[in-house]
Amino acid sequence: SLELAASVRKTVGAKQTLKAMKRNEVTQLYIAMMHEQVVAPLIAEAEGAHIPVDRAYTMTELGMACHIKVKAAAVGLLK
């Protein structure tokens, strides 16, 4: 669940998360709702790497879960 994001190693933001996915470091992906243009490459990479994707949260909720002061389009939990 998203509550894990506060206490585990993670990447925050679409660009950093995509880089980590390409290095095969992400085990779970959280993507904000309704931001298709930003997260389309992340979804494609996740499908190819069989990484579970959770799209149940808003950008504000993702940012708050990671204890950052801004919104986040994507969060990746690291191995």
Image (cartoon, rainbow, N blue to C red):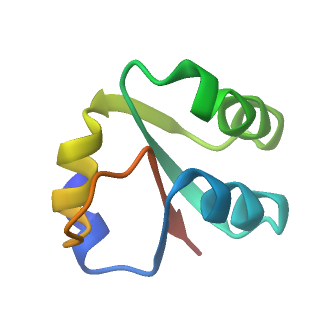
Residue at image location 50% in from the left, 58% down from the top: 13
Task: Give x and y (percent) for residue 47.
Answer: 74, 30
All told, the count of numbered labels is: 0
- In the foreground, 25 or 31: 31
Q: Position of residue 74 (x, y in %)?
A: 47, 48
Residue at the (51%, 52%) spot, across then down: 28
The answer to whether 20 appears left or right of 29 in the picture is right
Q: Residue 19: which quarter of the image?
A: bottom right
Q: Is residue 1 visible?
A: no
Does residue 50 appear to the left or right of 5 in the view shown? Answer: right
- Where residue 45 appears, as percent x and y from the top left, is 78, 39
Quarter of the rendering occupied by the C terminus:
bottom right
What residue is rendered at 71% in x and 67% in y?
20
Q: Position of residue 50 (x, y in %)?
A: 72, 39
Query: Residue lying furthest front in this view?
Result: 70
Q: Is residue 34 visible?
A: yes
Residue drawn at (25%, 57%) of the image: 63
Is residue 78 shown above or below 76? below
Q: Nearer the viewer, residue 49 or 72?
A: 72
**Quarter assignment of residue 24:** bottom right
- 60 vs 11, nearest the viewer: 60
